[in-house]
Image (spheres, rainbow, N blue to C red):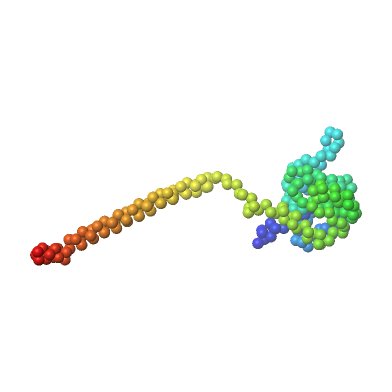
Amino acid sequence: MGMAAADLQFHVLAVDDSLIDRKLIERLFKISSCQVTTVDSGSKALEFLGLQEEHDEQNHPCVSPSNQQEVEINLIITDYCMPGMTGYDLLKKIKESASLRNIPVVIMSSENVPSRISRCLEEGAEEFFLKPVRLSDVNKLKPHMMKTKCKSPKQQQPEIIVTQDNQESIDITYVVPPEENQETDNTLQQQKSQDNSNNNNKRKAIEENLSPDRTRQRLSSLTTV
């Protein structure tokens, strides 16, 4: 039961430079039985996700995988306005990563700017929430988090790996006679039983013809003549 509950628990990464907002997000998701990790910048979020921001020769920022152990994250919720890397920049880097692009990303902001909302949704954000985030908003995110848990054996065809144990089991299965041999044996048994019944009928007919009663009837008919 404990392991099953742990498998169903969602892990949320909350990114916000405001301590008050981070505490609020953490509290709301913990009410929904989620594990929450909070960071105060986009660069720390990338570092936690196993990516690190570097600069190329022209001093352009780029993201490359780090040697840190990957952590399973089911949802990333980030503030839009942050110093250094904005929530929109973090969203773009996550969607550009082959290993992270399937993680749902939610943007939140205290400013209701339609063009900003549209740009984030077009870039791949699942939702755009206006602050303060409420518990009803968090409940809307459960279907998005479930998508990361839906890669179950029921939906994926398991790969068949032939091992030595499997090979032994395959050899054992071949010892069992095939159905064709069983059908042949059944046919031979039916023919044999049919021949036996025919022989019994013939024997019975011969015995009836040679019975004393029939002999007396023939002799009596001859005597009468």
Q: In this view of the protein, which residue sits in the foreground, 181 or 57?
A: 181
Q: Would residue 196 be found to the left or right of residue 47 on screen?
A: left
Q: Is residue 65 above or below residue 34?
A: above
Q: Would residue 203 be found to the left or right of residue 157 on screen?
A: left
* Residue shown at 75% from the left, 50% from the top: 103
Q: Would residue 205 be found to the left or right of residue 77 on screen?
A: left
Q: Is residue 38 visible?
A: no
* Residue shown at 23% from the left, 58% from the top: 203
**Residue 178 x %, y %:** 44, 49
* Residue shown at 72% from the left, 52% from the top: 148
Outermost residue on the top side: it is 57
**Residue 196 x %, y %:** 29, 56
Q: Based on the displayed image, in which of its 4 quarters is residue 193 positioned?
A: bottom left
Q: Based on the displayed image, in which of its 4 quarters is residue 22 positioned?
A: bottom right
Q: Based on the displayed image, in which of its 4 quarters is residue 57 positioned?
A: top right
Q: Quadrant of the N terminus?
A: bottom right
* Residue shown at 69% from the left, 56% from the top: 7
